[in-house]
Image (cartoon, rainbow, N blue to C red):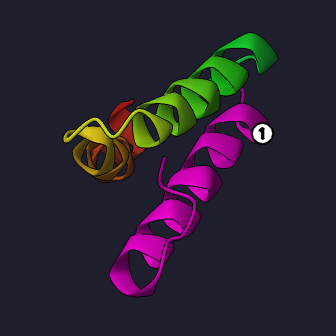
Amino acid sequence: MRTNFTGDDRILLDRFIESVLLRFSDGKYNLADATEELAQAFTRVAGGEPDALDHMRGLIEAGDDA
C-alpha cells in the first residue's frame, strides 16, 4: 500500500482533493458523491492500481465539465 506522496504526485493529490471539495462547495457534487470520489481514489492508490493517478489527473483536467 502506498502511503507516501512526494513531488509532482503530492501536488496532484492536493489538486485532486481541492477539485472534489470545490465541486462539493459549488453544488456539483453532493456529500455522498464527494465522499465516494475521495474514497475510490484512496482505495485505488492503496490497492496499487496503475490508473489511480490518471483518474485523479482526469478529474482535475475535466474542470467545470465534471
Q: Residue at x 42, y 67 (%)?
A: 12
Q: Which residue is mark 1?
A: 25
In the rendered image, residue 37, in percent from the top left (x then y), is placed at 56, 26
Q: Residue at x 74, y 12 (%)?
A: 32
In the rendered image, residue 11, in percent from the top left (x then y), is placed at 47, 77
| Whether residue 28 is visible | no
Does 10 appear in magenta? yes
The C terminus - image quarter: top left
| Whether residue 60 is visible | yes
Magenta stretch in the rendered image: 1-28
60 up-or-down from 55: above or below = below
> How many neighbours does mark 1 have within 10 angstroms: few (below 14), some (14-19), or many (20 or more)?
few
In the rendered image, residue 40, in percent from the top left (x then y), is placed at 52, 24
Does 57 appear in magenta? no
The quadrant holding residue 21 is top right
Mark 1, secondary structure of its residue: helix
Q: Residue at x 62, y 37 (%)?
A: 23
Left or right placement of residue 18 versus residue 51 in this view: right
Left or right placement of residue 27 versus residue 15 in this view: right
